[in-house]
């Protein structure tokens, strides 16, 4: 069997265990008596002493260094007397975090923690994921991107600009790791629902990477956030004296595509095992790049494919609440961008897999844009949306709800209030339990809030949203909105790709993982109206998603290693578990 880590003929288990944190895990997961520096040479970790050791975020344990370690590494006098464990350190982190007045201050504090003590940061993120995820991801990451120029402290990730043309490969030598497995890359043109934020969008790959580590146990050193800073169309940013990005109008056309081409080629050359996740590109470029690379490069687009899988999963799970067969559903999408189109295309495959003809399947899916229902008689329709156009006469959004009576309404507009009271009330007139999925992020751009969805449907809606909402109590009964976010899918896809060394990411992976995610929703979660698992279980979910990816990779002959029969254990052993 080929080792999944080095792709050589070495003994996989031994190789795995020879990495420091696997040794820690085997030693009882949280034991603090493992000597980091004795392993350092073997892992290319510099043997550090004194202040240099305390200043290294990867090796630093701060007050958790034992007396013996303090003596051995010249730390005596540099730390207060007390030796604490990671649990006590976490309590201090939480107290500090909770004392901050705003989410953006909390974001800054957590970023500083990551720069001080990587293991403590990830351990705390994992153990308190429900509380901390909204601070490192949506919605706070949206605010952080908006304020990037003001809050910038220390560079993270890798920046590429048009001035690097012809030099991207040699520049990758500057990255501190040689073995990169996951790259999240954005060009900053469509950051959440916030539009073109240029280089300020770097917060997104950084946040997505943090969740790769926390939600799927991808080792931090395998992760590389990348900003393809090709300029920005956002004039206010370009003219901001504090703007840190390439202050030119956005590169377009062949100049843009050739820079992306050089980037992809350089990744394949320098980091041949890396999976490229395209994130928050404009719709046009998102599809263009996916069409160009998906058939030959290990890559996927999270906004198109990850979102599609998570939404399909939510639709599957909703059937357990509404007691309707999936094949009978009618689904309406508001918005015709990357996310909505990705959902429609995966839904089409799912309907056909469930036995519908292509024509029948297409007839179950309808699109609404700013002009109203997308209908065949319209002259200008986006090419990927055209085949979903309805045979109806032209009509507005509410007219379309009335005429089509969709079971499920999905918003991917980036526009706050796009689901207004009239639309939700009309959905509630048409369905006993209308399923409303407001995908748009951050919270300030959601199509409707949880409170609105429940109130306007007299408490009957089944609701999920891209950013989290607190439970809502209405008429004495509490409703539990779920978070419909691709965070339930992309980390597991990455882990499955790392585990299987699959050559390509294929549609079957998204279909299989959507089913798996829906199966992960517990009966008690269904009982209380949630169509996604509680976020606290996201790490278990990602492991299951990764197993599905491995299965598909094996079935389709895409795996780059001989995968063992017991995929659950195999995937689990690959997951990074931070501790001392
Ligand atoms: N929950 C999740 O996991 C995910 C959520 N998202 C969110 O989805 C949103 C959209 O993302 P994406 O599809 O990539 O963005 P795009 O810019 O590609 O698409 C947005 C679409 O919405 C349309 N639109 C905007 N306002 C309205 C409106 N009032 N009525 C009808 N259509 C409207 C736009 O039309 P026009 O072109 O005419 O402006 C465009 O077609 C973002 O907020 C993003 O954060 C995205 C991915 C994952
Ligand atoms: C979640 C996500 O990927 C987005 O809002 O773009
Ligand atoms: Mg995105």
Image (spheres, helix red, strand yellow):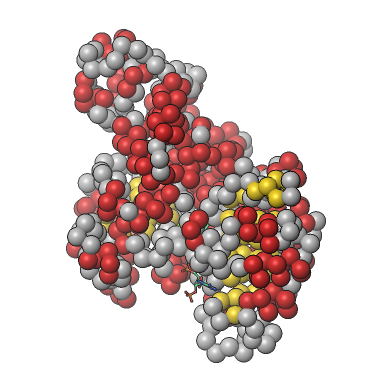
- Which is more toward the observer, 219 or 430? 430
Q: Position of residue 507 (x, y in %)?
A: 57, 60
The structure residue drawn at horizontal position 45% and vertical position 25%, both measured from the top left corner, is 91
The structure residue drawn at horizontal position 45% and vertical position 63%, both measured from the top left corner, is 193
Position of the C terminus, as image quadrant, is top left
Q: Position of residue 84 (x, y in %)?
A: 39, 16
> Does residue 190 lie above or below 359 as drawn?
above
> Does residue 550 lie above or below 566 as drawn?
below
- Residue 487 in view: yes
Which quarter of the picture shows residue 81? top left
The structure residue drawn at horizontal position 61% and vertical position 68%, both measured from the top left corner, is 420
Which quarter of the picture shows residue 109? top left
Q: Position of residue 481 (x, y in %)?
A: 64, 50
- Which is more toward the observer, 408 or 381? 408
The structure residue drawn at horizontal position 39% and vertical position 37%, both measured from the top left corner, is 100
- Which is more toward the observer, 138 or 76? 138
- Which is more toward the observer, 457 or 336? 457
> Does residue 226 lie above or below 346 as drawn?
above
> Does residue 125 lie above or below 329 as drawn?
above
């Amino acid at each position: 069997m080929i080792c999944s880590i080095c792709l050589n003929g070495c003994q996989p288990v031994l190789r795995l265990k020879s990495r420091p944190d696997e040794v820690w895990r085997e030693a009882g997961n949280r034991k603090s008596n493992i000597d980091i520096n004795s392993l350092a040479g073997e892992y290319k970790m510099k043997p550090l002493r004194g202040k240099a050791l305390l200043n290294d975020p990867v090796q630093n344990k701060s007050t958790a260094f034992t007396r013996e370690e303090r003596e051995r590494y010249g730390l005596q006098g540099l730390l207060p007397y007390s030796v604490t464990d990671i649990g006590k350190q976490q309590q201090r982190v939480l107290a500090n975090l909770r004392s901050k007045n705003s989410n953006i201050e909390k974001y800054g504090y957590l970023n500083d923690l990551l720069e001080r003590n990587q293991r403590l940061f990830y351990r705390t993120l994992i153990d308190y994921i429900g509380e901390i995820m909204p601070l490192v991801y949506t919605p706070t990451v949206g605010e952080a991107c908006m304020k990037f120029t003001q809050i910038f402290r220390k560079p993270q990730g890798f920046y590429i600009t048009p001035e690097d043309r012809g030099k991207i490969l040699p520049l990758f030598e500057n990255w501190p790791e040689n073995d990169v497995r996951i790259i999240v890359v954005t060009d900053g043109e469509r950051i959440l629902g916030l539009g073109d934020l240029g280089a300020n969008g770097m917060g997104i790959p950084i946040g997505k990477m943090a969740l790769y580590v926390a939600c799927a146990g991808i080792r931090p050193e395998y992760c590389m956030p990348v900003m393809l800073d090709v300029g920005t169309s956002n004039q206010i940013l370009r003219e901001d004296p504090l703007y840190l990005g390439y202050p030119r109008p956005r590169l377009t056309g062949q100049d843009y595509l050739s820079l992306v081409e050089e980037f992809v080629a350089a990744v394949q050359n320098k980091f041949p095992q890396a999976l490229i996740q395209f994130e928050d590109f404009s719709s046009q470029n998102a599809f263009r790049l996916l069409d160009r690379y998906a058939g030959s490069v290990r890559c996927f687009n999270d906004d198109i494919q990850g979102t599609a899988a998570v939404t399909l999963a939510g639709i599957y799970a909703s059937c357990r609440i509404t007691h309707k067969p999936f094949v009978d559903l009618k689904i309406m999408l508001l918005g015709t961008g990357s996310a909505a189109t990705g959902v429609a295309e995966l839904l089409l495959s799912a309907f056909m897999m469930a036995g519908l003809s292509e024509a029948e399947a297409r007839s179950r899916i309808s699109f609404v844009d700013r002009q109203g229902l997308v209908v065949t008689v319209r002259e200008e329709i986006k090419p990927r949306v055209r085949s979903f156009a309805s045979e109806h006469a032209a009509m507005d959004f509410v007219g379309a709800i009335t005429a089509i009576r969709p079971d499920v309404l999905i918003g991917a507009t980036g526009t706050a209030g796009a689901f207004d009271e009239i639309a939700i009330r009309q959905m509630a007139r048409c369905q006993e339990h209308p399923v409303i999925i407001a995908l748009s992020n951050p919270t300030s751009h959601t199509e409707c809030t949880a409170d609105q969805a429940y109130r306007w449907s007299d408490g009957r809606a089944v609701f999920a949203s891209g950013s989290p909402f607190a439970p809502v109590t209405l008429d004495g009964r509490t409703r539990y909105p779920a978070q419909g976010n691709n965070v339930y899918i992309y980390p597991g896809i990455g882990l499955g790709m790392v585990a299987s060394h699959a050559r390509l990411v294929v549609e079957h992976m998204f279909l299989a993982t959507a089913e798996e995610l829906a199966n992960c929703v517990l009966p008690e979660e269904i009982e209380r109206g949630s169509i996604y698992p509680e976020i606290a279980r996201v790490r278990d979910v990602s492991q299951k998603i990764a197993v599905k990816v491995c299965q598909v990779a094996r079935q389709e002959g895409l795996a780059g290693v001989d995968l063992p029969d017991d995929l659950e254990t195999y995937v689990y052993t690959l997951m990074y578990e931070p501790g001392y």
